[in-house]
Amino acid sequence: MKTRILTGITTTGTPHLGNYAGAIRPAVIASRAASADSFYFLADYHALIKCDDPLRIQCSRLEIAATWLACGLDAERVTFYRQSDVPEIPELTWLLTCVTAKGLLNRAHAYKASVDKNVENGEDPDAGVTMGLYSYPVLMAADILMFNAHKVPVGRDQIQHVEMARDIAQRFNHLFGQGRELFTLPEAVIEESVATLPGLDGRKMSKSYDNTIPLFGSAKELKAAVARIVTDSKLPGEPKDPDSSHLFTLYQAFATPAQLATFRAELSDGLAWGEAKQRLFELLDNELSEPRELYRQLIAKPAELEEILQAGAAKARRIATPFLGELREAVGLRNFSSQTQSAAPAKKKAGKVARFASFREADGAFRFRFFAADGEELLLSRPLSNPKAIGQLTQRLIAGGPDALELREDEGSQFTLWLDDECIADSPSYDTAEAMDAAMLRVRAALATLAE
């Protein structure tokens, strides 16, 4: 079985040399592996979260699609599509939203960063926060789970979102799988060896720093950009230190070992910076000239690009459409004409189940513990006045099911259970936020089994 790999490209800008070396080139190379079943998509729904300029979105979709194809992505070999051309993705987003805990999304880095910034500025914590930003992790989960990707290459800032996709998938599988794993649990892949290129000023190449080198500008524009690379003040003939030069770092990302060894020796022998920049320009132009011409041809024929993307969408939907039908069946959105299960609840199989256990403390107070089916203690109640209060409380929790639960993350390593604005139980302590998230999901899942 091939490993399914999925990569999304947000359509909010024009790719530059750093994007090419850090993401596009390694991804295109990886797509050619015989063991890979690769999915590449233009994340244009995600772009709407960051950008409200329709012309920019439109232009970026065209430029990014042309860039990936010009750089060697084989649309026949991979599945290359626009997110917005696969309507099953937003429908799956809603199915996943309905099982995603609000507390999980509260901990998303992007949302927390926005809240922290607002608080620092003395504004309302949610000022300027849209539901798009808040629900971003659920849409990303739908992108991944729609095609049951095994591996998702991401930057370190996106690891949390892949982990959230795993949590959401586990919750959905538990609620609706009936013993089947409807969703594969994805794995984040960090490419440690991928180049992070410095920009013209030595900082990381980024549009936000205005220090980028164009990928598919003209040769004249490329040469002009390379000429603006900041170097030290050493004169021709004076030895240069290659390892402290970001010009050398840029050269290293595109040179063969032999070319690199020669360039290093020449810099150490006093090669002038002007000549060094000319060498870098020639190296880059040699690699980019052919894809640059292909890019221009593609940009000039948007109708042909559209055909390629529509074919990719059709290919993606051959997987998505039947799978979404299976998911709709699983959650109960079934055709009335099809055979349905009896409305009567199925008899539970004998065996261990989640349970409440009440007890009396030495001081006379009453408490309950809530255990998972495997015996793991999930909650310990606050003290109550009498055993009748224990019974009433546990029956309310069982009758309300997971929807009755309000779990709040504590300041430390615990979470608490609230009912009608009253804290009624505490969790054990957990070493990591991930372990605590998993425990919160277990509480909901365990209560769901009692409510069935």
Image: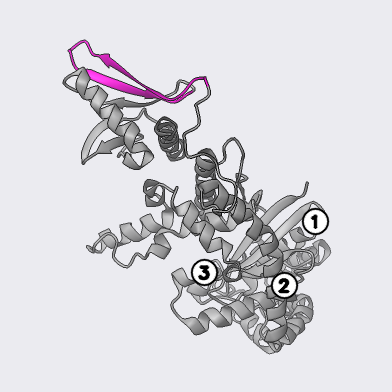
- Residue 95 in picture, x, y percent from top left: 49, 54
* Residue holding disc 2: 311
Q: Is residue 32 above or below residue 176?
A: below
Give the SS element for disc 1: loop
Residue at 47% over, 72% down? 48
Label 3 to label 2: alpha-carbon separation = 19 Å
Q: Which residue is mark 3?
A: 45
Magenta span covers which residues?
Answer: 350-373
Label 1: how many residues lie within 10 Å, few (<14), some (14-19) or many (20+)? few
Residue 151 locus on image (x, y percent) = 65, 50
Dot placed on the residue nearer the N-terminal end, 3 or 1 = 1
The kind of residue tagged 1 is Ala
State the image quarter where residue 395 is shown. top left
Earlier along the polypeptide chain: callout 2 or callout 1?
A: 1
What residue is at 46 percent from the left and 81 percent from the top? 53
Q: Nearer the viewer, mark 3 or mark 2?
A: 2
Outermost front residue: 337
From the viewer's perspective, tell me whether residue 53 is left or right of residue 36: left
Does any portion of residue 367 appear in the rendered image?
yes
Quadrant location of the C terminus in the rendered image: top left
Circle 3 sits in a helix, a strand or a loop, which is it?
helix
The answer to whether 210 appears left or right of 426 in the picture is right
**Pointer 3: residues within 10 angstroms few (<14), some, or many (20+)?**
some
Disc number at residue 99?
A: none
Residue depth check, mark 3 versus mark 1: number of the one nearer the observer: 3
Q: Secondary structure at mark 2?
A: helix
Q: Horizontal and vertical percent for residue 38?
A: 72, 59
Instruction: Write down the quadrant of residue 364 in the picture.
Output: top left
Point out residue 238 in the picture as x, y percentages from the top left corner: 67, 72
Amino acid type at mark 2: Ala
Q: Amino acid at mark 3?
A: Tyr
